[in-house]
Amino acid sequence: MTTIETSRLILRPCREEDRELFYELSSDPAVLEFFPFSRSRKDADAIFSMIGKITPEPGFDFLVAVLKHSGEAIGFSGLSRVQLEPHLPRDAVEIGWRLSARHWGNGYATEAGAALIRQAFTVLSLKEILSIAVHDNRRVLSVMRKIGMQPHPFSDFDHPQIPETHPHLKRHVVYRLRAAEWRAQQARHIES
């Protein structure tokens, strides 16, 4: 099981005690601004239970972001293989996160994202990471840029799992970061 430590966070595997946070993030209108629907308690609990039964591929755990100074769990993050052919390459690896709205604006998503990218390229030896988001989700796009990802507009697509009742959420943008680009970014950071 993966555990990653940053200066302010511990990213650890999900536990039963995280069920309430999962429901909060599955039902909070602010967090779900760019999702087509919220989840009922019953639906959120069913999904959470299903996640708990999956044995993840090494390095692809569903991680909980916990504040070091207080031990409070504030959100989820992780790497996952996405199956969105023909829109994305087969077995593309996506980085994602979802934080409690009361913790927005503190750089925690950026910190977790940067740690996951380091893990992806140094421990898992992945060649590329993708991230997708609704085209006007400025908060997420900002984090994607801060962690070194670049837009790849030729890959943007209308998400097939978004219902036609939510046309404003269908268009998704794709950001990418290749391992070689990340290493070059790290070298420039060390030099400056």
Image (spheres, rainbow, N blue to C red):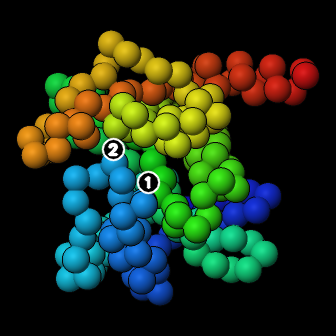
User: Residue tagged by mark 1?
Assistant: 60
- Image height check: is 131 above or below 104? above
> Of marks 1 and 2, which one's residue comes earlier in the chain?
1
Residue type beneath disc 2: Arg
Query: Would you call the spot at circle 2 few (<14 residues within 10 Å), some (14-19), or many (20 or more)?
Result: some
Query: Which residue reaches farthest top?
Result: 154
Left or right for 163, reference 93: left
Q: Which mark is residue 187?
A: none
Left or right for 98, reference 57: right
* Location of residue 54 in the rendering, given as x and y in whole percent from the top left corner: 30, 68
Q: Quadrant of residue 23?
A: bottom left
Count numbered badges in the picture: 2
Left or right for 136, reference 146: left
Residue type beneath disc 1: Phe
Q: Secondary structure at mark 2?
A: strand
User: Residue tagged by mark 2?
Assistant: 81
At 81% from the left and 20% from the top, the residue drawn is: 188
- Image height check: is 4 above or below 41? above
Residue 90 visible (yes or no): no
- Image height check: is 54 above or below 162? below
Query: Would you call the spot at circle 1 few (<14 residues within 10 Å), some (14-19), or many (20 or more)?
Result: many
